[in-house]
Image (spheres, coloured by chain):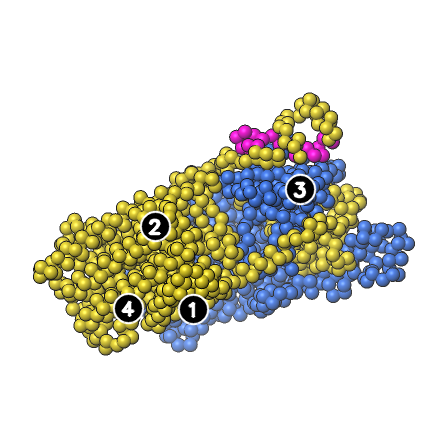
Chain colours: A yellow, B blue
Amino acid sequence: MAEETTPPPSRTPQLERRRRERGRRPGDRFVRVVRPYREEFQRTGPARYRVSEEVLRPRSTLGGLLDLLRRALIGRRLATHEESNKRVSKKTGLAIFASDNISSSAYATEEIMRVLALAGAGALALTMPITIAILVVLAIVVLSYQQTIRAYPNGGGSYIVASDNLGMLPGLVAAAALLTDYVLTVSVSIAAGVAAIGAISPFVYDNRVAVGVLAIAILTVGNLRGIRDSGNIFAAPTYLYVVSLGGLVLFGLFRLFAGTLPTVTAPAEWLPATAAPLSIFLILRAFSSGAVALTGVEAVSNGVPAFKRPEPRNAAITLILMGASFGSLFSGISVLAGHMGIVADPTEQQTVLSQVAAALVGDGWFFWVVQVATALLLLLAANTSFADFPRLSSILAKDHFAPHSFAFRGERLAFSTGILVLASLSMLLIVAFGGSVTNLIPLYTIGVFIAFTLSQSGMVQHWRRLRGLAWRYKAAMNGLGAVATGLVALIVGTTKFTSGAWMVIALIPLFVAVLYGIHRHYRRVEDALTVSDPEEARVEVLSPLVIVPVGRIDRAVSRALAVARASSPSVTAVHVTDDVTNAAYLEHRWQRLFPDIELVVLESPFRALVPPLLRYIDRLDQGEPGRPVVVVLSEFVPRHWWEVLLHNQTALGLKLRLFFRPNTIVIDVPYRAD
Amino acid sequence: MAEETTPPPSRTPQLERRRRERGRRPGDRFVRVVRPYREEFQRTGPARYRVSEEVLRPRSTLGGLLDLLRRALIGRRLATHEESNKRVSKKTGLAIFASDNISSSAYATEEIMRVLALAGAGALALTMPITIAILVVLAIVVLSYQQTIRAYPNGGGSYIVASDNLGMLPGLVAAAALLTDYVLTVSVSIAAGVAAIGAISPFVYDNRVAVGVLAIAILTVGNLRGIRDSGNIFAAPTYLYVVSLGGLVLFGLFRLFAGTLPTVTAPAEWLPATAAPLSIFLILRAFSSGAVALTGVEAVSNGVPAFKRPEPRNAAITLILMGASFGSLFSGISVLAGHMGIVADPTEQQTVLSQVAAALVGDGWFFWVVQVATALLLLLAANTSFADFPRLSSILAKDHFAPHSFAFRGERLAFSTGILVLASLSMLLIVAFGGSVTNLIPLYTIGVFIAFTLSQSGMVQHWRRLRGLAWRYKAAMNGLGAVATGLVALIVGTTKFTSGAWMVIALIPLFVAVLYGIHRHYRRVEDALTVSDPEEARVEVLSPLVIVPVGRIDRAVSRALAVARASSPSVTAVHVTDDVTNAAYLEHRWQRLFPDIELVVLESPFRALVPPLLRYIDRLDQGEPGRPVVVVLSEFVPRHWWEVLLHNQTALGLKLRLFFRPNTIVIDVPYRAD
């Protein structure tokens, strides 16, 4: 197998002689001789070449322009080996993985107050107790996930933990819930980010749907580039947000203790004319709206392998820092909003945060810093999903639960399919819900809590199975997490059911069914295709029935007939026509030109061409079942795309039908006019 | 060649013996033996079968439902021999071919008055002189066409007369002008018909665009049915219109002479606040608007062969009757409208005709009869184009100036492509112009007069060439027609240029260029394909280079390899990959399973699959140019359409690229999982 790679380019006499000396018939195994052009194919072994980027260079003008545009948007192509394996520190990790969670503080208080306000201004006093309840759940989740991180140092997403410990179905439910929630994270974060800018720019407020869609488009291009060294991009806005909001909260608390905290009088129409009674249900609904605060915890446990050594320890510390940062900001804003008598703006033009900031520091430069930092952080929070969704869907694809294309990596090594699907779905949601955070919130968080519950239950099972050191304590810890998040899932599902959560609850089983259907399909194909016994690979084909459809006698048909004759001794030409006179003339010419090939004429009084031919092939096939049918098609190749319209699409229709016919092989013999 | 058609169904021992006695190897020429199933294939000669309708019966449920719907809409399939050759009498002929022309009387007066009104109420006095000028042109055209009918008894459309006598280019200009005008005839007639109903139903007036589109859809279905015996459908409304409008006009003239003609006072806002000066240009523009009256003359000369014997005489008499009917109605309405002081309604809610009718007979039953008859006739006028457009485009297709599909006849023997194209274009116009007659009118008629001029000039040339009896007189007669219609074309083109005629004038050369481009393409293909010398038909193909792209080792690939091996001794398998480890494993398995087939591995660091393969084939090809390349593709056949999404489309992309590669044959080896 070594000699075929000798580089023999031109057909010199020496070469011919050398080849003959090796006992080769020229033309016979000539195929193997390819010159490894240095700029295109580089020899790396016997019968093995490495292809250079040169081969991918477009050769048409239009292709060149498109390529130029693509290069400008997403950058040069990256080879597989160029993948970056840079690890992140705790500081960068906090910025990258915690932005989703920390950014929730920008709207969590507001969403709680929005619900409580339905029962009148008095009910707003409950904002603080609900905030505390949410912080308690957050603490439990953070502690519970400490264990997940240590148990799954290679990344412990809910799908992996649940399917690993509880089985396929719970795993798929967790995956479906998470994927749904990732889409919602993008929509909600973008909508909230646009709202933050909308509070300072009426133009953005008026065009919030378009601005939201544009923002998602920018994120999409950025992610198709496969944002490398993204740490720095992330770090700035996250820390800007934490510092500026932390400063604001501290300043507010200082004025609260100093007794100089300003109060805000909301316009009367911001509160309902007739207040609803303050029911338990309403309180639970307010709690559910605030529970968005817990989204984003998953990101850290997904990202464990990206941390510097020791990965689990660094990730665990990052998770605690995240909880602490978020908790302080969230509780601070809730305290201030409560004491300042702030009411949520039902038109969503002013956010609660912007009201707090405006009242405390006026609308000077610091107000703008807070708003811009909020908007930037919310954009980055959306970006967390752009990392998580493609990764989870690629894992599902590798496990054959999602279309395999989700596992393919694009020109920049990013999972392009997942990125594009996420972008399309979240844009759709922004448009469908008019870019309103409040309208989107009811759909959000239910998925996260289902995934949390399954993941923590999986961890309980994990410890019970392993029975390692102090396993009872660990199982109890995760069990507490499972119970707490399960309870929240129940509360969220119940209180938001009619306002939108029903869509997600109905979608998840459907989604699971689709994932499972895809899996079954791939498994069936795999079973059908896999060669287990070497003997199975050595298939012999019977001499086929060869059919050549003939419309008229021309060079294209002559070529098809020559190909047909070369593949079998028994060739039948079939002419379908509605013109009997013309058929007789064709038969006459045929006998002179192709006396060795039988011509069958099918008169089609209803002028259909494809069905009679197909049925005739069926009838031939019945005569000798099992023998393969080969149909040789002569096809005219147009020079320009519009020329396709000028030729009837009979060949195309026939090809499509034959593709689905069992045991049928189609030979395409294109004929070019030039 | 006779014995192969003996009906030999089952593989009985006797049969086998008989075949052996004839010296045949079983399986070799077995192909030829097909049992002519009585219900599907009926033997009509040696190697010749007639296909029954049974073959066209859909076999899937969805196909069955679609077929049911189609049968309900357009009726059962018609065989070619079922074509009706029924001839029409003068009475039916008038109804069929004259409806377009006669229907113009419903809006011609109105369009003249609408323009004159711009110069104030006083200018309306010019309505009658302009009407007379139009009638003079009509008389000249009718007399001139008398000669065309006698000279072209097989149908003398402008395209045929012009290309016959003046050459290809004038013929194409006439064809382009006519086709444009046919589309406008449908739009204008439907818009005017809907306006007539709109005058009695505000609902129809408010939804005129939707009603217009619906009316065209109904006409389309009717024409796809290939309205047979259409005479009766046409006769009723045409005669209803002629009789009811004739009655109305006579009643009006009686009251005029009796001095009891009522006058109508138009709302003041119907006339412009500041009147434009009554310029020559405005008068000529009014004349141009009224010239719609001359459309539809072409239809009779197109339809000569449809008349009873003697065809030319009957057609000629019909043309005169048409001119007389239209002339009386048109002049009558102009006289009455002038004396009654009627003003056109700028909102197009009241037509001039409906105002005349309402003033004369009140809004009782007779008013309704007039309006309904008008609407029905206008619908039928649109239908004239549904006969003319598909026929002209089929003639162009037969002359290779239009896509050949325009010459194919559908299930009901109608030229379906032409019908559907006409319907789509005219619907588009109705929508684009908001269903307004006044907005559409400037585009209309310019095409008709260009075609008239070319046709009559062609006739002059015709007589000069023939030099028969009294040829000078005949040439002079047609010459007068050419001059008159040419003058009108000039007037129409100038006065309506800025208000819309420029679109048509710009479109016609473009359209001619497209027709010519199509012709050139077909001629080029014909030149390339036609076999002139019998030797050319006997092509021999060189032993090809056979390439089998291999993604992994499975049953589908095994089958493709078997097919490849059967077609050539030199087969190369190519594996493109970005995973070097996996490639090494595949190479290892390959050597055990297919030691006789060379496997080339192309490492693709940028993960592209198709371009490296194509470039590799190019390089192989350079080694031995001219030798055909055969690519054998193993393709997985999905069971359901959605399964296509689960398999990557590499094979499809490859196939498309290979289709355009010179000297390349693709063999599709489908593999079905079941």
* Callout 4 secondary element: helix
Residue type at mark 4 is Phe
Can you give x and y, in whole percent of width and height, for residue B452 in the image?
A: 51, 49
User: Does A658 appear above or below A471?
Assistant: above
Question: In the rendered structure, the residue with mark 1 lies on which chain?
Answer: A
- Give the CA distance from mark 2 to mark 3: 48 Å
- The overriding secondary structure of the stretch rendered in magenta is loop
Is the residue under label 3 in contact with that under label 2 (CB below 8 Å)? no
Q: In the displayed structure, does residue B113 sit left or right of residue B83?
A: left
Query: What residue is pinned by disc 1?
Result: A506
Q: Do discs 4 and 3 belong to a common subunit?
A: no
Q: Quadrant of the C terminus of chain A?
A: top right
Structural crowding at the residue carrying mark 1, measured as other residues with C-alpha within 10 Å and reported as few (<14), some (14–19) or many (≥20):
few
- Give the CA distance from mark 1 to mark 4: 22 Å
Query: What residue is pinned by disc 2?
Result: A314
Can you give x and y, in whole percent of width and height, for residue B640 in the image?
A: 58, 60
- Could you tell which of marks 4 and 2 lies nearer the N-terminus? 4
- Give the CA distance from mark 2 to mark 1: 38 Å
Badge count: 4
Structural crowding at the residue carrying mark 4, measured as other residues with C-alpha within 10 Å and reported as few (<14), some (14–19) or many (≥20):
many
Q: Residue A287 got which mark?
A: 4
Q: Quadrant of the N terminus of chain A?
A: top right
User: Does B245 appear above or below B302?
Assistant: below
Quadrant hosting residue B610: top right
Q: Is residue A474 visible?
A: yes
Q: Residue B591 got which mark?
A: 3
| Residue at the image position 31 percent from the left and 44 percent from the top | A232
Question: In the image shown, does A379 or B253 lie closer to the viewer?
Answer: A379
Q: In the displayed structure, does residue A606 sit left or right of residue A225?
A: right
* Callout 1 secondary element: helix
